[in-house]
Image (spheres, rainbow, N blue to C red):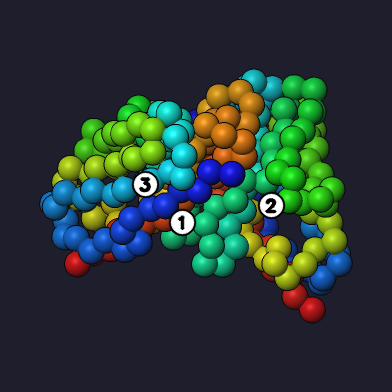
């Protein structure tokens, strides 16, 4: 069965970086884009960006101003999301999710379990 | 970006009752709307895509309707496991956006 398994919770100080992993199984890794979304406390879901595991091309929402980096390791079917220059407002649960369709115009049919990132001094 | 407004914010019903959840878009999204169920501590689950198509494994009591700016998720007869938060999401315009959610609670 399709599974996306994320790395564990992180606590970071303002200005630091965090790197979250998302390991895929149960399907052909190269065939589906992986998206990153987040949900801050008491807020709705926010789409952050996506990576095409076949080739590594990425696209992200413009409001991260170069702080977001997404990479993949095809040998382990794992994608990574790194967010730098962390602020308290980045405190959120971060999700990876598989795109049902190719590209950014898609619903998300399988999700990781979420990774809580807490930014606090 | 397109703003999705969900109503009501909270819906209190009993098992066996019918639930009707609404999602309104700030501009037309055609039929490019999805619905998700989110239980505490679990990953969101895709229920409906492209307004009215049930995702794989989703029970027939869940149905979606609408087009343009007004959409509805209907749960025909609530089961205990259906009490959760429900989100709508549009894919018509970049970036994809979500509504703020409707909390379905046990009355």
Tell which of A6 and A48 is nearer to you: A48
Distance of label 3 from label 1 (alpha carbons): 10 Å
- In percent of width and height, residue A112 lies at 58, 45
Q: Is residue B21 above or below residue B47?
A: below
Crowding at mark 2 (Cα within 10 Å: few <14, some 14-19, many 20+): some
> From the image, which quarter does the N terminus of chain B lie in?
top right
Q: Is residue A48 above or below residue B54?
A: below
Residue at 35% x, 62% y is B9
Q: Chain of mark 1?
A: B
Q: Quadrant of residue B15 in the image? A: bottom left
Q: Chain of mark 2?
A: A
Left or right of A58? Residue A102 is left
In this view, the mark in front (1 or 2): 1
Number of the label disc, if any, that sits on residue B23 = 3
Crowding at mark 1 (Cα within 10 Å: few <14, some 14-19, many 20+): many
Residue at 58% x, 57% y is A39
Residue at 80% x, 63% y is A86
Tell which of B32 and A26 is nearer to you: B32
Crowding at mark 3 (Cα within 10 Å: few <14, some 14-19, many 20+): many
Provide the residue designation for mark 1. Answer: B100
Number of the label disc, if any, that sits on residue A102 = none
Give the total number of marks visible in the rendering.
3
- In percent of width and height, residue B58 lies at 33, 35
- Does residue B84 show up? no
Provide the residue designation for mark 2. Answer: A7
- In percent of width and height, residue B107 lies at 19, 67
Tell which of B30 and A5 is nearer to you: B30
């Amino acid at each position: 069965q399709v599974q996306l398994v994320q790395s564990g919770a992180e606590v970071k100080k303002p200005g630091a970086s965090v790197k979250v992993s998302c390991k895929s199984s149960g399907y052909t890794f190269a065939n589906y884009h992986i998206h990153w979304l987040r949900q801050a406390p008491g807020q709705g879901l926010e789409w952050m960006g996506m990576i095409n595991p076949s080739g590594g091309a990425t696209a992200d929402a413009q409001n991260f101003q170069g702080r977001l980096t997404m990479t993949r390791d095809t040998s382990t079917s794992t994608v990574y999301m790194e967010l730098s220059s962390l602020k308290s407002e980045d405190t959120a649960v971060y999700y990876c999710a598989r795109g049902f369709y190719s590209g950014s115009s898609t619903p998300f049919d399988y999700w990781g379990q979420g990774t809580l990132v807490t930014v606090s001094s | 970006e397109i703003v999705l407004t969900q109503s009501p914010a909270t819906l209190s019903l009993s098992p066996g009752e019918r639930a009707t959840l609404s999602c309104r878009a700030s501009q037309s999204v055609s039929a490019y709307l999805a619905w998700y169920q989110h239980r505490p501590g679990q990953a969101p689950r895709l229920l409906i895509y492209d307004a009215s198509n049930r995702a794989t494994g989703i029970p027939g009591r869940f149905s979606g309707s609408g087009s343009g700016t007004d959409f509805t998720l209907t749960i025909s007869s609530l089961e205990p496991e259906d009490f959760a938060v429900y989100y709508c999401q549009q894919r018509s315009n970049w970036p994809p956006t979500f509504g703020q959610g409707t909390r379905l609670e046990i009355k």
